[in-house]
Image (cartoon, rainbow, N blue to C red):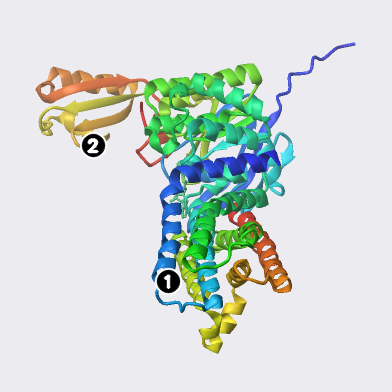
Amino acid sequence: MTVVAAAPVRTVAVSLEGLRRHRGDVLATDDVSLEVLAGEVFGLLGPNGAGKTTLVRLLVGVLRPEAGRVSLLGQDVTADPRAASRLLAYLAQDEPALNELPVGLAVETTGRLRGLSRRDARSQTADLLDELGLADVQERPLTKLSGGQRRLAQVAAALIADRPLLVLDEPTTGLDALARRAVWEILRRRRTEAGVTVVLVTHNVVEAEQVLDRVAVLDRGRVIACDTPGRLKALVSNDVRLDLVWRDEPPLGEPAVAALLARSEVDGRRWSARLPAADAREALGRLTAGPALAALDDFTLATPTLEDVYLSLGGRAHDLERS
Amino acid sequence: MSAFLALYVGQVSRARAARGPLLFVATLQSVGILLLLRGVVDEGSDTTAQQVVAGSTVLVVAFVALNLLAQRFGMLRGTGALDYYATLPVSGSLVVLATAASYATFTVPGAVLTAFVGALLYGLPLGHLWILLVVLPLAGASLAGLGACLGLLAPRPELATVAGQLGMSGILFLGIIPEHRMPAVLQVVRAAVPSTYATDAFASSFARHLDVAALLTDVGVCLVVAVLALSLASAAFRRAVRA
Ligand SMILES: Nc1ncnc2c1ncn2[C@@H]1O[C@H](COP(=O)(O)OP(=O)(O)O)[C@@H](O)[C@H]1O
Ligand SMILES: [Mg+2]
């Protein structure tokens, strides 16, 4: 008799099937199907206007899909969006609802509305504000905080009451590096300690590479790729990115310079080209050997990022953030 | 119930921070009207005096509960802030009721002050002023319900604001001009407008002899309007949060 050990089955936390939705005349969500496993930090990456916000609003049930289905932890919530509100916490890209409340009260009230007792809401609020470095400003209304502090306060409101699913639309946009790391750290801890599932929208490739277990790349309403950041980068692993900054007018008469121009994105004096590694080495060799060197201010050669993945998959926009 | 309290406390706290000056303006406007009209109203014309004082008192309620609440809900809807409530496990009715209740609460000091100043200025008896305590919550609830409807149903936030302001002007006009001096058409309009019943109920609190039947009718109408307006606002809220 053979005993077959059952493979560990991971629960599906979020399942989107064939979602479709217009915003105005734009097809903002175009036949999107995705599965997010329980305990994953899952990302939606894409430039502005790609349809990330529309997709998460369909997910949390504040937009109704024209076609398709949303299931959360096995429950079909398309028909009953109230059910979603008991499973998840949602942080909108702009969150004006709490603006005039003092930080502490905003977080505590949100906790109570998620069903915490007054005492639990108080103690969780105190812990969260400590964790996010907001304890000193808890009496201040959100409108009287810096943009970064306000965002952190909104993140705190999303985190209170330990929802098993967190849906966060650009939680770290506008935060400085330190605060951004604090948020990443909290999300990681929630995941490892409580098995929380996170769906996180970002248009920052560093964030995508550092915190996400898997990422769906969105472009014009469609998912153009979905995998781990590492495997996605392997798609373009033979490529490197060559970035140049010219000090003076680039010497376009040089054949090496002209050839590179043809393959670069140009932004003023900044050129950026994605090339096979061998080509990049050769181009750099010719540039630095010839008279072009005198006009060069700086150059960098970098291994591919998710931005390169996005571009190689046919993405067109150029406003993904690189830091 | 605890969710209601949490919402209510939150609303009161933000209103205290953000709306303080407006509450002052609301009261000042009504007291100003009382002072201005003092010279115009004939000595000894009790019904006119009663109506002017009652109309000014209702105006405070209209300013806060109708006008400011219409603005607030218009803004919540226009900025996408309703998503916050829609993704919490609380019902739309609860959000509407708690918000309306907090705005209605904020009408109390101004309305009481206006009624009191008015009674002194116009030499009206203060014996039945307790009626205010019954009528205020109902007038507050019905006007707040209407304000919430305006805010949630107007196609754009600016229109909600305009509608709230117009509503307030209408209430001022219909509430303060004595009924017996109005043309017949306006008397019909006056009878059709919910604030009239709040005004009349207030007015009876200054009467020397209380007409209990009339008072009960007025209070009853306020109650019915409050229930209808708040139900409609709740439905409008549910519709607005799931676009
Ligand atoms: N309320 C709206 N009315 C009209 N068009 C909208 C609205 N919201 C979003 N869109 C359009 O839908 C598309 C997707 O927008 P969005 O989901 O906000 O993208 P992202 O979050 O990725 O920046 C964009 O083309 C945007 O212009
Ligand atoms: Mg967005």
Quadrant location of the N terminus of chain A in the rendered image: top right
Label of residue A50 in the image: none
Give the quadrant of residue B25. Answer: bottom left
A7 left or right of A28 in image: right
Q: Residues within 10 Å of mark 1 (few under 14, many from 20)?
A: some
Task: Locate the C terminus of chain A and report the quarter of the image it occupies.
Answer: top left
- Please provide percent x and percent y for residue A217: 49, 35
- Pinpoint residue A254: horizontal percent, then vertical percent: 12, 29
The amino acid type found where label 2 is placed reads Asp
Q: Nearer the viewer, residue A78 or A90?
A: A90
User: Residue at point 69% right, 38% down?
Assistant: B2
In percent of the image, x 45 and y 37: which residue is there? A46
Q: What distance separates the C-alpha of mark 1 from that of mark 2?
A: 72 Å
Which residue type carries mark 1? Arg
Q: Position of residue B7 (x, y in %)?
A: 61, 42
Is the residue at mark 1 in contact range of ligand 1, meaning its CB lies under 8 Å from it?
no
Q: Report the residue marked by disc 2.
A: A267
Where is residue A3 drawn, in percent x and y?
85, 12
Whether the residues at callouts 1 and 2 have beta carbons within 8 Å, the answer is: no
Report which residue position mark 1 lands on: B38
Disc 1 secondary structure class: helix
Q: Residue at x 56, y 77 (%)?
A: B47
Dot in front, 1 or 2: 1
Check disc 2 and report its element: helix, strand or loop.
strand
Q: Is residue A264 visible?
A: yes
Residue A20, placed above or below residue A175? below
Seen in the picture, residue A7 relative to A261 is either above or below; the reply is: above
